[in-house]
Image (cartoon, rainbow, N blue to C red):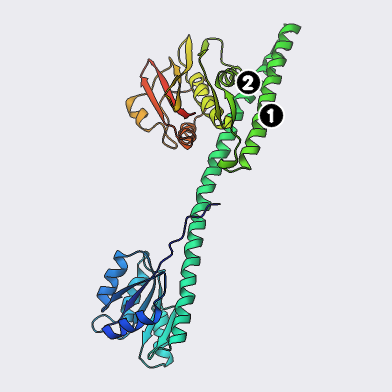
Amino acid sequence: MNIPDQPSEFTILLVDDRPENLISLEEMLAQEGRIFIKASSGNEALRQVLKNDRIGLIMLDVQMPGMNGFEVAQILKSNPKTRDISIIFVTALSKEDQYVLEGFREGAVDYLQKPLNIDITKAKVNVFEKIHFYQRNLENTVTELDRINKQLERFVYTISHDLKSPLTGMIAILSLLEMRQEEGAFIQEEAIEYMVLAKSAAYYMSTMIDDLLAYSQKSVDQQTVESVDTKELTHQIVRLLFPPPHIQIQISESMPTLKTRRLKLQQVFQNLISNAVKYSDKTSGLIEIGCEDKGDSIEFFVKDNGPGISDNDQAVIFNLFRRGRAESTLQESSTGVGLNILKMLVEEQGGTVRIDSRLGQGSTFYFEWMK
């Protein structure tokens, strides 16, 4: 897990109405990596905190004209943006419990009595500096874990989406065989052909599961780069999608062989081709798959003569949980997640994705894949 680099500076706000006390505190606490901001009143201290979100500790004098330290602390602790900043009260007031307790009630995390003991003051500030960076590390770890969890959610969706097509085909084949047997129209040659298709789909699923398991156990840098014949890859995807007889799929003869991560390219093609089949609304459906060499990249396309996508839908179709208005001819639900994942997969490889579509005339999805 890669945690973002931590800032090396620790910012301390010194608040005291006497300039000589501010100078003394800074000299006492100065060391490499520390930044000091000074305020000579409660109001100025609040302004400094609100415009600087890097403050990790406030050394706050209690006795100040106008707004005292207790009042400053009360305001800071009532604001969600500033309530977690550590505050050490610095005071010449009596050491009686009532003053100490009031400071803690208003949000102090520690108390220092004037005149300051240099060693104790340094030690306490060192402790709060360490706590500050521990908290930052924890916050960044939580953020990173949240990002990883979102990736895992997308990964789980991708697995289910990619495995669904060959599984659906296998179910259709077995159902057809069962129907043929019940009708008494069982033909051995036809049954053998169907069983070969079912076996191919099962083998394809097994290989995909192995690839997905390997993918899940490796970082991006560790994932295998291999030679991928995109013509063979797309033919395999089409064969195991079991498109209905009225849909013709044409694959260009000039499809290239690339050195790339096979699984990700397979996921992109499978998503686009299966969508083109699923949303076909013509009695004679046509899907064309091809490419154009762009030098450092190949721009692939999947073109269909389906219902098309409106301009408004085109503007948001790659957003998470957004989908076009075309209804599936297979009455299959669509979550609107697939195209968002497709976009991220393409962009992870340094490419882009775009669409050209007209209502009633079909759609062409283009995606750029780096060589």
- How far across and down, in percent of the image, does residue 368 sit? 44, 28
Task: State whether residue 223 is above or below residue 37.
Answer: above
Residue denoted by label 2: 169
- How far across and down, in percent of the image, does residue 165 sit? 59, 25
Task: State whether residue 144 is above or below residue 217.
Answer: below
| Residue drawn at 57 percent across, 32 percent down | 261
**Image-based side of 219 in relation to 300, left or right:** right
Secondary structure, mark 2, is helix
Task: State whether residue 281 is above or below residue 11.
Answer: above
Residue denoted by label 1: 206
Secondary structure, mark 1, is helix
| Residue drawn at 46 percent across, 86 percent down | 119
Q: Residue furthest left?
A: 66
Tag 1: residue type?
Ser
State how far apart marks 2 and 1 are (Cα): 15 Å
**Image-based side of 339 in relation to 63, left or right:** right
